[in-house]
Image: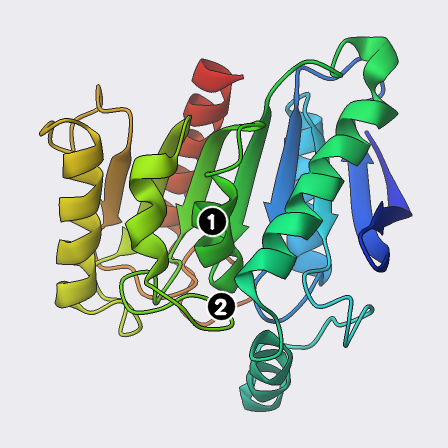
Amino acid sequence: MVADWVDVPVPGGVMPAWWARPAGSPRAAVLVLPEVFGVNGWVRSVAERLAQEGYAALAITTFWRTAPQLAVPYDAAGLAEGRRHKDQVQADQLLSDVAAAAAWMQTAHAADGLAQKPLGCVGFCFGGHLALLAATLPVIAASADFYGAGVSSGRPGGGPASLELVPQIPGRLWCFCGDADPLMPPEELTAIERALRAANGGQDPASPQARHRLLSASGAGHGYMCAARGDYHPDAAAAGWSAVLELLAGSL
């Protein structure tokens, strides 16, 4: 596995991104969408874990327009700084960035046969919300949304709830949440469950056979996948990682 920073051309500029890939030909390509804390050490480690599993992985800087090098700690000041930049981005900009990043990944590995292959997407926190939006792009075959709060109440930059876009998703969307997450109250989880069930044609999103799934981690709070956060839940994190690999292997 090798990893380093690259510059990805996007509409309106250049977006820094952390590019991790296996030494040999990749199985497929995956986008990693970060929390509001930026492409920090933990987010880079996610891309590197995917590369160790055989995937080319690109962690993009969703705030490149205002803070291209953002990587803040998991504390109150870091959260405030991240949210300040989050409030300055819009859904159409984020989708444009994701589409450009996907095209760049396919081009970078065209010789390995990735030019015509669909991609996966994994996002956390604000990146999880973005993963749901990204799932509407035809190039994304599988999207993992980890505790993407606010999808039932709004959309980055304003507009209808992002959850209303679920019927437009051509691939598969798996939503992960902790049942002790204060940022995703029961009413939001209920709204997500209903939207996924409707998109499944009535099939329960808790079913392992469902195309769109809702996976709830018992006793886990917000950010439970991240070992650097206070809500880290080792058992839930291990189960979540296993499920992501299952989703990618079954879709890509």
Query: Of the residues under marks 2 and 1, which one precedes in the sequence?
Result: 1
Tell me the SS state at disc 2. loop
Q: Is residue 185 above or below residue 218?
A: below
Relative to 34, is 229 on the left or the right?
left
Residue that label 2 marks: 156
**Is residue 227 visible to the viewer in this orientation of the structure?**
no
- Residue 8: x percent and y percent? 86, 46
Residue 68 placement: quadrant: bottom right
User: Counting other residues with Cα less than 10 Å from the Cα at mark 1, is it few (<14), some (14-19), or many (20 or more)?
Assistant: many
Q: Contact, CB < 8 Å: mark 2 with mark 1?
A: yes
- Residue 18: x percent and y percent? 80, 48
- Residue 95: x percent and y percent? 60, 50
Amino acid residing under circle 1: Leu
**How are the residues colored?**
rainbow
Quarter holding the N terminus is top right
Q: Is residue 66 above or below residue 14?
A: below
Amino acid residing under circle 2: Pro
Q: CA distance from mark 2 to mark 1?
A: 10 Å
Q: Residue at x 25, y 49 (%)?
A: 217
Tell me the SS state at disc 1. helix
Residue 184 placement: quadrant: bottom left
Residue that label 1 marks: 133
Relative to 241, is 48 on the left or the right?
right
Q: Residue at x 81, y 10 (%)?
A: 112
Relative to 127, is 222 on the left or the right?
left
The label shown at residue 145 is none
- Residue 127: x percent and y percent? 53, 57
**Is residue 116 visible to the viewer in this orientation of the structure?**
yes
User: Counting other residues with Cα less than 10 Å from the Cα at mark 2, is it few (<14), some (14-19), or many (20 or more)?
Assistant: many
Q: How many marks?
A: 2
